[in-house]
Image: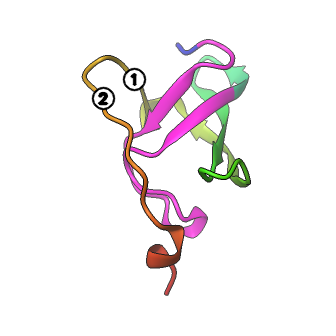
Amino acid sequence: MFALHQTVALTQDIPESGLQSGDLGAVVAILDPEHCEVEFVAASGRAQALLMLPIADLRAIGDQDLIAVRSLAAARP
């Protein structure tokens, strides 16, 4: 289970929201033991997506993870 405001990484792509595996989000609500609401933001601080996700689609981040930046424009058709 994750904690409120914990930073998590997505474990699969969600193309309809412009998200890819490895994108970072913050847990903003814990809905039940199997689901939480996660906010993903662009580097500028603009909200990209606010999604209810199964906990199985997320993982905790740690010292082995490196933060990177990618262009959202490149992901759009």
The Cα atoms of the two marked residues, 1 and 2, are separated by 6 Å
Task: State the mark number for residue 31.
Answer: none
Label 2 CA crowd tier, 10 Å (few <14, some 14–19, many 20+): few
Foreground residue, 31 or 5?
5
Where are the magenta residues, as a range? 3-27
Q: Residue at x 57, y 37 (%)?
A: 25
Residue that mark 1 sits on: 61
- Left or right: 57, with 30 as reference point: left
Q: In this figure, which colouring scheme has been used for the structure? A: rainbow
Q: Label 2 near label 1: C-beta < 8 Å? A: yes
- Left or right: 14, with 45 as reference point: left
Type of the residue with mark 2: Asp
Is 44 within the magenta?
Answer: no
Residue that mark 2 sits on: 65
Helix, strand or loop at mark 1: loop
Q: Residue at x 61, y 12 (%)?
A: 3
Q: Position of residue 31 (x, y in %)?
A: 73, 25
Is 23 within the magenta?
Answer: yes
Q: Position of residue 10 (x, y in %)?
A: 44, 41
Residue farthest to the front? 44
Q: Residue at x 46, y 74 (%)?
A: 75
Instruction: Determine whether 67 is above or below 50 in the image.
Output: above
Residue 16 position by quadrant: bottom right
